[in-house]
Image (cartoon, coloured by chain):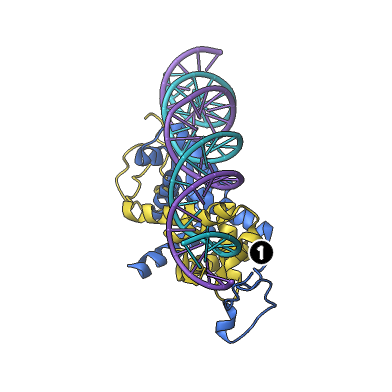
Chain colours: A yellow, B blue, C cyan, D purple
Amino acid sequence: MSRDAPDATSQSKQPNGTTESACCTGVPEVEEDDLVADVQLLSALGNDTRYELVCRIGAAEGDVCVCDLEAAVGISQSGVSQALSRLYSAGLVTRRKEGSWRYYGLTDDAEQLLDTLATLRTDDE
Amino acid sequence: MSRDAPDATSQSKQPNGTTESACCTGVPEVEEDDLVADVQLLSALGNDTRYELVCRIGAAEGDVCVCDLEAAVGISQSGVSQALSRLYSAGLVTRRKEGSWRYYGLTDDAEQLLDTLATLRTDDE
DNA sequence: GATTTATATTAGCAATTACTAATATAAGAA
DNA sequence: TTCTTATATTAGTAATTGCTAATATAAATC
């Protein structure tokens, strides 16, 4: 490359690796297993219906019954059931049976994430 | 409904609302604007390529050049560019020009989220 | 056992997504 | 000015997603 522009790190007065091209340093490796797990979690949340379900469960006191969620969210019973199943697979909700009723609650992971998101919202306002 | 099963809250010894059906309490309202913003952020991250980009940028010291990200992630130049554009729109990355080079860094929001995700990973092991 | 209710699972389809190739724009060198 | 390089934007398409309707399963009642 003919440009010889300074790389990003040369400006921080602390060179941290050999320059492999004129503008750039290498990019660190990332842990593939971590990526897969995180993306499963993030993509489960990254949908209107599913995130709304998580937020409603999180805002309730105690566990919430499917039938209530169904009425609140306003899509079909099967749609809600599938959404909850996806959230459960991603480790974001807990579920228990009680007779013919199914109750859903948030996992600790989900609660922590919602907390962080709430913090970001507040900081951004 | 003919079942008359106890609702979820009756077990916590603290009734918190009128029972609108035999099994259930109401579901709290959620703030629609918050949902939209959060889902934009979460869905931007909920994709292999884009999350990998964020993680690589986060793991680097200082800002990273597009051309380095492109080589690291291994999809087309246009694919990387579109991914970065989506992340920028979601407020997860910063960008600056320097000559013909473009450098990307993480926003504070993104850093906080990555921290939380790392914490969850550690807790879950 | 038959019937009803709650909800999970399956099948199908329109809409959306994530990517490549092509093109446009910007910057630097000759 | 032309040419080259870096990278954003556009167009197109195969794959994936999110939903409804239908069906299956589980639990309760008579």
Q: Is residue B4 above or below residue B30?
A: below
Find residue D15 and report its image quarter: top left
User: Residue A8: x and y, percent?
Assistant: 42, 46
Is residue D25 or residue B114 the one in the foreground?
D25
Residue lying at 65% horizontally and 61% vertically, measured from the top left:
A71
Quadrant for the N terminus of chain A, please.
top left
What is the residue that sits farthest to the left in this orientation?
A: A18
- In the rendered image, is residue B101 in sight? no
Q: Amino acid at mark 1?
A: Val
Mark 1 falls on what kind of element?
loop
Residue lying at 59% horizontally and 53% vertically, measured from the top left:
A48
User: Residue A68: x and y, percent?
Assistant: 62, 65
Q: Is residue C22 above or below residue B125?
A: above
Is residue B51 or residue A6 the one in the foreground?
B51
Q: Is residue B60 above or below residue D6?
A: below
Is residue B32 or residue B90 the one in the foreground?
B32
Q: Is residue A21 left or right of residue A93?
A: left
User: Residue A18: x and y, percent?
Assistant: 29, 45
- In the rendered image, is residue B65 in sight? yes
Which residue position is annotated with label 1?
B30
Is residue B52 or residue B94 the one in the foreground?
B52
What is the residue that sits farthest to the bottom in this orientation?
A: B13
User: Residue B16: x and y, percent?
Assistant: 66, 80
Residue lying at 37% horizontally and 64% vertically, measured from the top left:
B121
* CA neighbours of label 1 inside 10 A, class few (<14), some (14 to 19), many (20+): some
Quadrant for the C terminus of chain A, please.
bottom right
